[in-house]
Image: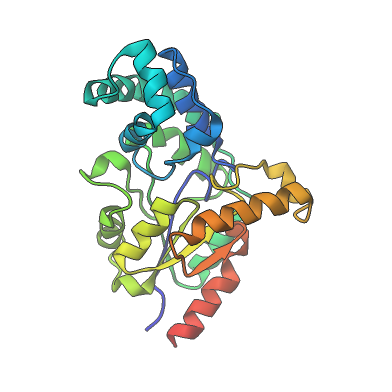
Amino acid sequence: MALRAVIFDWAGTMVDFGSRAPVEAFRALFAEFDTEIAEAEARGPMGLNKIDHIRALLAMPRVAQAWAGANGAADEDAVARLFARFREIDGDVVARFTDLIPGAAEVAAALRERGLKIGSSTGYNRDVMAAVLEAAARQGYRPDNLVCADDLPVGRPSPMMMYRCFLDLQVWPASAVVKVDDTVPGILEGRAAGSWTVALALSGNAAGIAVEDLADPDAPHVEEARARAQEMLRAAEPDYIIDTVADLLPVIEEIEQRMA
């Protein structure tokens, strides 16, 4: 048996180095409701569908207290109010962070040359992804499918979006597919589906550093970010942890050798 497909996340994995768009969107959202959230708080639930991300933020004791002081109970009515406004502002924020992560287009092309299909899934809703798809295509990245948070009733860490990718791409078994993601829920999603999982430590949410930091990957602050991200991602027990998608091809070769 050989690999059939690789399924990539978007923000922090293939676009938006540092996963900055959702952080800015959530912080701006809560600020509109007179509730300040820190960057670390905004990053905490990353990888979940956005409405679940809002629920997780409101469940944080400090955020819940701040919200209650300004707006009342942190209940499902609050979630609905926040999510409705989030959908209005998210697209404008996301559209500013569509640069491909270095190596993303080249790795996808190399995988296709090996005969693999390229799937994609995201915690963003489909209307937000229109601008991202267009920008990625201009930069040379065109996945074979896209599964969005609002396509299905249940998102990560369930395997439902992975299952939809299997159907879209017509690939099976799950063990012939690799999931690449920068978040714990995304890795848990791949594991729940029964696929190989590769976590990205430096390009995504867990590290939260800028692409310019790659100029000196051994700098102390980069090493600290790598160690912090690796510790966080290990909790999801991925099969591999690498820095960015640019480091993926040797892992694909090793997986195929192990499968053989």
Task: Give the image location of residue 12, x and y in percent.
Answer: 53, 46
Q: Where, quadrant-wise, is the C terminus in this rendering?
A: bottom left
Task: Give the image location of residue 254, x and y in percent.
Answer: 54, 79
Left or right of 90: which side holds 207? right
The answer to whether 198 is drawn above or below residue 44 in the figure is below
Task: Give the image location of residue 94, x and y in percent.
Answer: 48, 31
**Residue positioned 31% across, 58% down in the render:** 162
Q: Nearer the viewer, residue 248 or 45?
A: 45
The answer to whether 115 is drawn above or below residue 166 in the figure is below
**Residue positioned 30% across, 21% down in the render:** 84
Query: Does any portion of residue 143 appear in the rendered image?
Result: no
Q: Nearer the viewer, residue 9 or 115?
A: 9
**Residue positioned 58% across, 53% down in the render:** 229
Q: How many marks?
A: 0
Q: Nearer the viewer, residue 47 or 8?
A: 47
The answer to whether 52 is drawn above or below residue 158 in the figure is above
Q: Where, quadrant-wise, is the N terminus in this rendering?
A: bottom left
Left or right of 217: which side holds 147? left
Task: Give the image location of residue 172, x and y in percent.
Answer: 29, 72
Splitting the image into 4 quarters, where does residue 96 fall? top right
**Residue positioned 55% across, 64% down in the render:** 241
Which residue, as the protein is rendered here, is positioned at the far bottom?
260
The answer to whether 239 is drawn above or below residue 62 in the figure is below
